[in-house]
Amino acid sequence: MAADEIRGPVLERLLGAIDRPLTSAGSQVLAHAVLDRFEDSRSDLLARFSDKVIETLADGVRHDALAVDPARTVAIWFVVWPGSHREVQAARIGEYLGEFAGILRRVVEAGAPVQCLLEIDVYVVDADKPPGAGKPDLEVEYSFAPAVFFGGAEPSEPQWMTVMLNPGLLSSDEYEAVQGFIT
């Protein structure tokens, strides 16, 4: 099956899942504000993200991509996990915050003057389904943090100061350390 024939159904499911986050109801508003920063390249960006889902469907392993908007204001870390949120959750507890902070720190240290990072986690519920075997069932959740915590640029908009983390993925020590920041 041609890549475009697979990408279409995957993209359709991804777009639907983006508007139905599993955690942090309403977080899709912030996600769309970040995606809107990609203006002219948004469709190419979403196609690239769909390709990561297709890769996970093909090999059953995690794939990710990092994107910085043309104005270098925001960054998106797109991560595709094989399995449902519930299946992957146990393996992420205690790893989640360190990985998220590490990516944000690396973006800032690389000199990108970003103001914030949006992590889009996509869970491929039926990751064992081969590409092209119908539309995959996708689950999405978001994490978000301002880059200023890691020496990044001061936010130009109040929404870029939002901290959005999934407390279900934090170890008890991590939760204690960040509970004052979680929305």
Image (cartoon, rainbow, N blue to C red):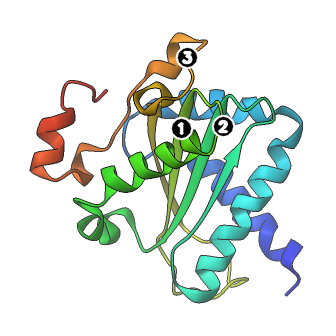
Question: Rounded to the nearest whole Å, what is the CA distance between mark 1 and mark 3?
Answer: 11 Å
Residue named by callout 3: 155
Q: Which mark is residue 117?
A: 1
Question: Mark 2: which amino acid?
Answer: Ala
Query: Which residue is drawn at the image coordinates 40% and 28% (left, top)?
Result: 149
**Closest to the observer, 54 or 153:** 153
Helix, strand or loop under label 1: strand
Could you tell me if residue 20 is visible in this image? Answer: no
| Amino acid type indicated by mark 3 | Pro
Q: Nearer the viewer, mark 3 or mark 2?
A: 2
The answer to whether residue 61 is left or right of residue 13 is left
Q: Do callouts 3 and 2 mark residues in contact (Cβ within 8 Å)?
A: no
Q: Is residue 174 left or right of residue 100?
A: left
N-terminal label among 2 and 1: 2
User: Residue at (29%, 61%) from the top-left corner?
Assistant: 95
Specify the quadrant of the image occupied by residue 91.
bottom left
Cα–Cα gap, marks 2 and 1: 11 Å
> x%, y% of residue 178?
21, 34
Picture coordinates of residue 27, whole percent (x, y): 47, 32
Write down the quadrant of residue 181 in the picture. Answer: top left
Q: Quadrant of residue 19?
A: top right
Looking at the rendered structure, the secondary structure element under dot 2 is: loop
- Lower sequence index among marks 1 and 3: 1
The answer to whether mark 2 and mark 1 are in CB contact below 8 A is no
Q: Quadrant of the N terminus?
A: bottom right
Q: Which mark is residue 112?
A: 2
**Whole-number angstrom distance, CA of label 3 to CA of label 2:** 14 Å
State which tag comes first along the sequence, 3 or 2.
2
Residue 88 in the image: above or below residue 18: below
Would residue 44 be visible to someone looking at this image? yes
